[in-house]
Image (spheres, helix red, strand yellow):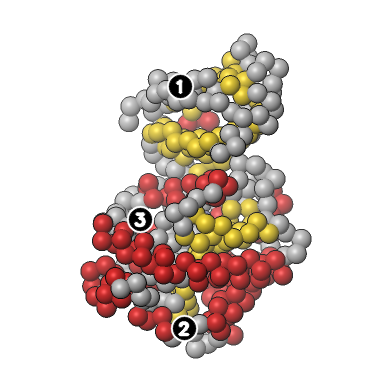
Amino acid sequence: MNSIQLLFAAAILTGAVETRIIPRFDGLLMELTSSEPIACSIDVTGYSVNVRPGDEVLLPDAYLPFWVLGWELDTDSCGFSIELTDAVDSLEYSLAEDSLTLLLFFRAAEPLLFPELTWNGPPDEPDYGMFDPQYSDSSTIAALELGQQSPWLSDFDCVVIDPGHGGRDPGAVGPDGTYEKDRTLEIALLVRDILNICRPELDVIITRNTDCYMSLGARTRLANARRADLFISIHCNASTRSAANGFETFFLSRARTDDSRAVEMLENSVVEYDDTNDHVFDDPLSFLLADIAQNIYLERSSSLAVAIQESLQDRFPENINRGVKQAGFYVLRGALMPSVLVEVAFISNPEEERTLKTLDFRLAAAEAIVDAVLNFAEEQ
Ligand SMILES: [Zn+2]
């Protein structure tokens, strides 16, 4: 990979500027927050950010893997420039509509190594012998093309629980080193176990029950192949603002709100390292079918999302209810049934990271999800 030098010219930041970085296995997400609108333009020859003299730029914590970037702090001009090294493949950015928050994602050329995590070549994805939904299930395709729901949805008898991330993809990493993939697995296993106890006739399928990598496409393919009536992906949120807290639930939509963009960017970024190349949305037909399915299940997905939020609110009255949101998550795209993605807490928030480690919290979160599933089942 050639050294890419990006110049962030004329990034004039007036007012207080805060800079934070979240390390991910596939790159670094950096957020600049200002009380005054940020003006910026991008040039591919280098990168620099200038701030008004006297403003303080808070550099990220020392433990972050700075070897990825060659940092140069230019104190004279009250700005700093970043020279991208060979380790960085590309820079993606997004400026919030109010221009107060600028997100930069430095995509790593090679996966970043975290303690106990290594890049092990091909994904250790289990082989489920799944059918390819767009070519082998003609009755489903026919129904979708008529704008009808998947034919198996008349009986509510199967739920797929999807613990986010896994294996070489740790998801978000908390300030104390907690991996999202571990917490999501623990919560998902509890959801499965509780559902098995209180609704033994319901078929509860978990996309992974160990710490293994699974592509995003394989997760919904599994749900489609098993003719699931519901797909719930469980995640822990992360923000570049360590104070961000609370729970939120998403359903699939093309309409993206500004505050959903960062979450979407984090949860989708795994796709870049997904060499299985099996995303349901890769070819035109399945893209179209995914679109139709999305519209058919929009209402029920959103009501499930509302139910989960209410249920979480009941269990965690002290925590912030961030509401139901819409975003373009790849992991939901291709699900031929109602589907949601729930972010139970912020692993990037030191306090919530601590709570995520407690069984009490995980049990209550799992119970909240189960309550919502059971309510949803009643209404079908
Ligand atoms: Zn996640």
Q: Nearer the viewer, residue 345 or 153?
A: 153
Residue 257: x and y, percent?
54, 49
Q: Quadrant of residue 287?
A: bottom left
Can residue 256 be seen? yes
At x 56%, y 57%, the residue is 325
Residue placed most toward the observer, 372 or 59: 372
Q: Is residue 31 left or right of residue 154?
A: right
Report, in whole angstroms, how far the alpha carbon at label 1 lies from the one at label 2.
Answer: 54 Å
The picture places residue 336, in percent across and down from the top left corner, at 38, 70
Q: Amino acid at mark 1?
A: Leu
The kind of secondary structure element at disc 3 is: loop
Q: Residues within 10 Å of mark 3 (few under 14, many from 20)?
A: some
Q: Is any atom of residue 129 visible in this view?
A: no
Residue 376: quarter of image: bottom right
Viewer-nearest of discs 2 and 3: 2
Amino acid type assigned to the residue bearing label 2 in the image: Phe
Residue receiving disc 3 = 123
Looking at the picture, tell me which residue is in the foreground, 9 or 123: 9
CB within 8 Å, label 1 to label 2: no
Q: Residue at x 50, y 50 (%)?
A: 256
Q: CA distance from mark 2 to mark 3?
A: 32 Å
Name above or below for residue 230 compared with residue 164.
below
Q: Earlier in the sequence, mark 1 or mark 2?
A: 1
Q: Which residue is mark 2?
A: 156
- Determine the secondary structure under disc 2: loop
| Label drawn at residue 7 | 1
Closer to the eye: label 3 or 1:
1
Please state which amino acid type lies under the numbered disc 3: Pro
